[in-house]
Image (spheres, coloured by chain):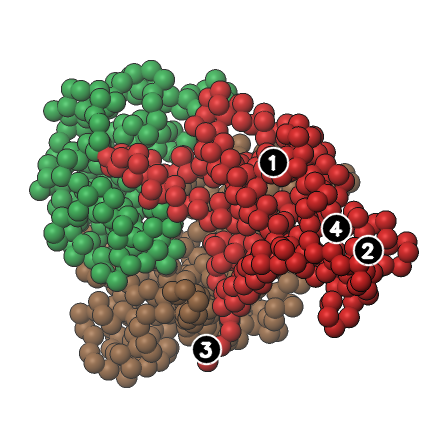
Amino acid sequence: MSLEGMGLTFGYRGKGKKGVLDHVDLCLEPGERLGLSGPSGRGKTTLCKLLSGYERPDKGRVLVDGKPLGEYKGLCPVQMIWQHPETAVDPLMKLGDTLREGGPVEEGLLEALHIQPAWLDRYPTELSGGELQRFCIARALRPGVKYLLCDEITAMLDLITQAQMWSFLLEQAERRQLGLLIVSHNSALLERLCTRIQPL
Amino acid sequence: MRHWNGRRAALALLLLALLVLCAVTAAGCLLGEQAMVTDFSRKNLSPCGAFLFGTDWMGRDMLARTLTGLSLSIRIGLLTAGVSAVLALVLGLASALGGWVDSVVSWCIDLVMGIPHILLVMLISLAFGKGFVGVVAGVALSHWPSLARVIRGEVLQLKGATYVRTAEKLGVSRLQIARRHFLPHLLPQFLTGLVLQFPHAILHEASVTFLGFGLSSEQPAIGVILSESMNYLTTGKWWLAVFPGLSLVLVVVLFAAMGEQLRKLLDPASVHR
Amino acid sequence: MEPILDVKDLSISFTQYSRGTRQVLLHVIRELFLTIQPGQIVAVVGSSGSGKSLLAHGILGILPYNSHMAGEITFLGQPLTQQRAEQVRGREMVLVPQGVTYLDPLMQVGPQLRKGKKDPQTKARFRQVLNRYGLGEEVETLYPFELSGGMARRVLIATAAEAAPRLVIADEPTPGLDARAASRVLGHFRELAEGGAGVLLITHDLELALTIAHRVTVFYAGVTIEEADAADFAAGKLRHPYTRALWNALPQNGFVPIPGAQLGPGEGGQGCPFAPRCTQARPECLGPVPYRSLDGGRVRCLYPEGGNL
């Protein structure tokens, strides 16, 4: 039972011969909080995209609980949360609809994330990044989701919102036995949050 | 009374233009009979109270003829713009699926855009045997590329958008994604493109008819009226060309204004202006 | 000494369409105060959505079409009108924008910086400037998308520094950069300040602000609520409850979240925007709250720490 990336190799086409990732191995257990650190340009975001199926690796494979990621139909058990929430919500859709994209939202999640009821009727341009990120997190917490990949999700947010989100996510991860992959360049943050840190 | 702002003015202009165009279309339909009535007792009258646009060498009422012609033009414009917009939508969507389809459609777009419009309309019209069918085919088959290109770009962008990919990962079905994400983004582009094609379609229909490659000369089309009046212009019958010509310009300007106002209302970049 | 920039009681509002054709006026920034002395780095810290980028746009005179600005901005002792802003921006006053999206993607870096000038003197001068920022000759022939995040940021700073500005406005200069690249970028801002320029650093990152700035102005929901020395933070001399909450939310200082969310633009009236989340809030906090001097800084709170009315 784990999210495994084995020998992941990836290079964007047309970017010369140099690949972004070269034979990277990674294993994330349920309930574990794995920190991923490293200078920019090392492919941290790319690794997240491979592990959640947004990109296919040139070589290597991704297994979720022993089964290849591509064999999962419907809701993907690995969900990614992005650094820029503005890009992850449809600008022409009311946030209430965005929130319910994957199905009804669990009772209590909105209050725990401090999402004001009035925001559900608004469009993304009317809210700030911190407010949108709360919606992205609530949307990703579906019952079938087992692993959450957090790519610098609070890098653009203020400190109080950052602390709020992480205290919420840690509590949810504990309750649902989620495996969290936490990408950040902030080493103090990683030390605070993670059970294990892997440099890339 | 609530004060005027940009959006209200745009909406009012849009409705006004629509109203005028509907009125012209309806009047033309009703006056169809009258436009054909010849009466040699009143031939070559210059504009007066009874005949605002004057009469021609067969005593036909030029106002009725102009309105009938415009009405015909507008209806042909609606038909051709509609057909070519749907064509653009289908080809744009198909193209966005990628692979060889994209290559073929892109090649067609470049080909059609590379040939001068009026020449293409004439050639297609000739190939379809001129007349009503020829004009409709000619205009409809030559006006789709620019809109198809816009739709293709939009769909490609949407396909790669993070929020669409995220919806896929959340298990949302393809049909639902099309309805929730693609439709709301494509509809404004499509509508604006459609309305902005009317003036082109109308002008090109009138042009090919004027040049003799379009509607047959029995029909009171604007192109026919204008080309016939050429013979009489030199003898001082200025009203035969001036009023129908001005009316055509007015209709085209109204359609263009409608498209522009619609764009203003739907375009997110100017949404708060 | 004459301040480089002095902003008094600035407010910025927008007209927007709400539903259909109804227009509403949104007050995004109100009662903003800011002073920058020569050689000083002043950080404006605020969360996203607090309107801090608009401050930069307001000073530079590049606000969008549906906005209105009121208040008093003095630049080098003279009022900064729209006309004057147009004259001085890019010369005495420069913006270091957030990222490469502000560069022309179809033009190589070198020609772009030189703005088309080809004479040897200009070339040599720019060569020197780029060198100073650790950018080799090869950078001049690269296109913006070929630059790494850190390199792009240094190119933008080099562009700004070349004009020998008196005021540098930096909008979120470090997100996406790793620690080493970020500290290098910040070092360049420090050099600019040491050369006598004023630096206005706009950021959401308190930690970053504290490593480089002399003064920190805290922004909350479009209102300046505190101005403090950078040293006041570590010394526990903070005046406003929000600033203290911000400090305590740092991962290395307790990581304490407080409940609730910031008011959106236009929400809330005359009172303290933090009152709904403040544990010490009293009914009078919803009335007008003056911005006043206190213990070497300024605060907008009726019951600040370390002082009473």
Q: Nearer the viewer, residue B46 or A35?
A: B46
Give the chain letter at badge 1: B
Q: Residues within 10 Å of mark 4 (few under 14, many from 20)?
A: many
Q: Are marks 4 and 3 in contact (CB under 8 Å)?
A: no
Residue that badge 1 annotates: B133
Residue at the far right in the pictured view = B235
Chain B, hue in figure: red
Can residue B148 be seen? Answer: yes
C290, above or below B104, in the image: below
Where, by quadrant of the figure, is residue C91 drawn?
A: bottom right
Of the numbered discs 4 and 2, the one sitting upstream in the chain is 2
Residue that badge 2 annotates: B57
Residue that badge 3 annotates: B2
Amino acid carrying label 4: it is Ile
Q: Are marks 1 and 4 in contact (CB under 8 Å)?
A: no
Q: Are marks 1 and 2 on the same chain?
A: yes
Q: Nearer the viewer, mark 1 or mark 2?
A: 2
Measure the alpha-carbon separation of dots 1 and 2. Answer: 29 Å
User: Secondary structure under badge 4?
Assistant: helix
The chain letter corresponding to brown is: C
The chain letter corresponding to green is: A
Measure the alpha-carbon separation of dots 2 and 3. Answer: 53 Å
Q: Position of residue C128 (x, y in %)?
A: 65, 40
Residue that badge 4 annotates: B225
Q: Residues within 10 Å of mark 3 (few under 14, many from 20)?
A: few
Q: Residues within 10 Å of mark 2 (few under 14, many from 20)?
A: some
Q: Position of residue B97 (x, y in %)?
A: 43, 28
Measure the alpha-carbon separation of dots 4 and 3. Answer: 45 Å
